[in-house]
Amino acid sequence: MERAVDIAVVGAGFAGMYMVHRARAANLSVQVFEAGTDVGGTWYWNRYPGARCDIESVEYSYSFDNDLQQEWEWNQRYAGQPEILTYAQHVADRFDLRRDIQFSTRVTSAIFNEKSNNWRVTTDKDDVVTARFVVFATGCLSSTNVPHFIGADSFTGPTYHTGEWPHDGVDFTGKTVGLIGTGSSAIQSIPIIAEQSKHLTVFQRTATYSIPARNDTIDKEYVKEVKANYNEFRDLNRQQMGAFGSNIRRGEQAALEVSEAERRQEFELRWEEGGFAFLSSYNDFLLNHDANETVAEFVREKIYSIIKDPDTAKKLLPTQVIGCKRLCLDSGYYETFNRSNVSLVDVGSDPIERITEHGLVAGGDQHTFDVLVYATGFDAMTGSLLKIDIRGRNNQPLAEAWDAGPVTYLGLSTAGFPNMFMVSGPGSPSVLTNMMMSIEQHVEWISDCISHIVSSGKTTIETTDKEQTEWVAFVNAVADMTLYPSCNSWYLGANVPGKPRVFMPLLGFPTYADKCTEVAANGYEGFVLV
Ligand code: NA7
């Protein structure tokens, strides 16, 4: 049956959930479609052992409702996946969000009708919804990346991807396990899988820098302090580059301005404290290669001192710029390689040749195992959007419009796709920030914009080719001032073979948020309103 709503939303993670709340507040009807059976998005799917947020709990939470933030009690300094999912479910209950969300339903197409100026959204459950506006709240890390290995289907044992983990868990007891990847998901799950399994073989293409998370139960005194001035605390965080970490001591000097002894002392102190603060000791790690090398070398020395077997230690030493790929935070990652039931295979120089019935072949060697785990990441930022048949004016597919890489204005809108918005889309700070703050800022901007269009009697809003071309150039020019483009990160799409190499997230939340506010205040400058 065909239904009509004001806003169709794709995805019921934190972005889609807040979109429902804001739409209702604006008296707009909303229909959300969600592939999972409940809310939570990333935290619904990523249930691999050890999955944990790398932003502190008091910050990785909604700020829009003071009662909510005052009443909710976090248990851990960095919340694990189950705790975050429980929080998402609590928010859904508290604001009665589920009645506008249809679960177990995947959106298959969203097609703009130029005659009626609305979107026709269809699903795999044969729903058809026409909506004036469509909002993609599909998440930045939601479309799993499974490399196309020869023979992948021939493996006879169970295969799992960290980003689509079974809900009832996996029992590795007595099993031999092969795990591909050494990004955050691998680094979090490896210590736990190693403890459970008979033997774990890790296949590493690029060695990764990881810093101790020093996760613990939350410091109740600290929480009390935060809650005493929670809104100010949120505002202070919004003024940080990544919209988090106002409590982090940020070094104001360049790394090479101080003596080596002083630097080492500072690095040691921060290594003990754990967390992302480690990379804030000096202000130029991502601007100056020599400065970066001082801290990179410190971490390499730490790794070398932890690992007992010198050959394994050498393989684990990363060489790229530290921080260029998202820094990992761990609980016992390197120590795990001292276990007698864990081995490390370097597939950087000798890539995986094929998957076989009982394992895989790399560098001419056959490795056998019972269970295969892909910790191979995501087709980040664009993957989930491009899986849907999205078509704008002239029936143009989004995939065609983004043939050379995603082009957006503010990461919110793309030319030729009127009344379509993306939450934390490519070209916005998104994954370089505390996602909760970016999500709130986007959802508020989008809902205000929609209210403005509706109340001012306009029909459509869309950006222009010129505006978005300039915006993409700006996002990349900002990145080019840093060391970020120097490695093959998923920020650049470099982890997915054939994906256009474009730096997708914009560095700097505060200036970005100001720009969005200014655009709206100036009558949606850079957009055409009809
Ligand atoms: P990541 O960080 O993208 O890590 C994926 C890992 O998988 C990484 O080590 C990759 O090596 C490896 N990989 C990918 N393809 C292959 C092939 N073909 N062969 C061997 N190894 C491969 O994903 P995560 O899920 O760990 O983390 C994603 C984000 O979630 C993270 O940044 C946090 O923000 C939370 P590579 O480094 O590309 O050589």
Image: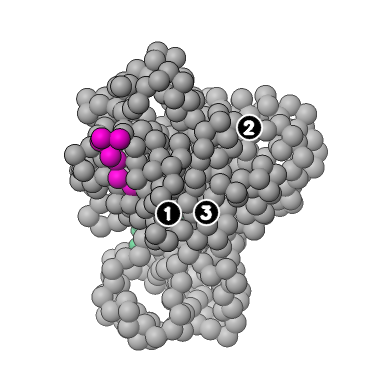
- The C terminus is located in which quarter? top left
Label 3 environment density (alpha carbons within 10 Å; few <14, some 14–19, many ≥20): some
Q: CA distance from mark 1 to mark 2?
A: 35 Å
Identity of the residue drawn at 57% across and 85% down: 174
What kind of element bears circle 2? loop
Ligand 1 within 8 Å of the CB at mark 1 = no
Residue 238, image x and y in percent?
56, 28
Looking at marks 2 and 3 on the same chain, the residue that comes earlier in the sequence is marked by: 2
Q: Is residue 112 magenta?
A: yes
Q: Choose the circle earlier in sequence order: 1 or 2.
A: 1
| Residue linked to disc 3 | 102
Name the amino acid type tagged 1.
Met
Between disc 1 and disc 3, whose residue precedes? 1
- Choose between 199 and 239: the one closer to the eye: 239
Left or right of 410, for residue 17: right
Seen at 80% across and 38% down, the residue is 221
Secondary element under disc 1, as helix, strand or loop, is: loop
The residue located at (26%, 44%) in the rendering is 391
The span from disc 2 to disc 3 (Cα, nearest Å) is 24 Å
- Look at mark 2 in the image and give the residue it sits on: 64
Instruction: Kindly report the distance in space between the C-alpha atoms of the residues bearing marks 1 and 3.
Output: 14 Å
Tell me the element at label 3.
Answer: strand
Q: Which-is-in-front pick, marks 1 and 3?
A: 1
Where does label 1 land, which residue? 1
Decide which of 177, 312 is in the foreground and name it: 177
Look at the picture and state if 279 lies above or below 382: above
Question: Which quadrant of the figure shows ligand 1?
Answer: bottom left
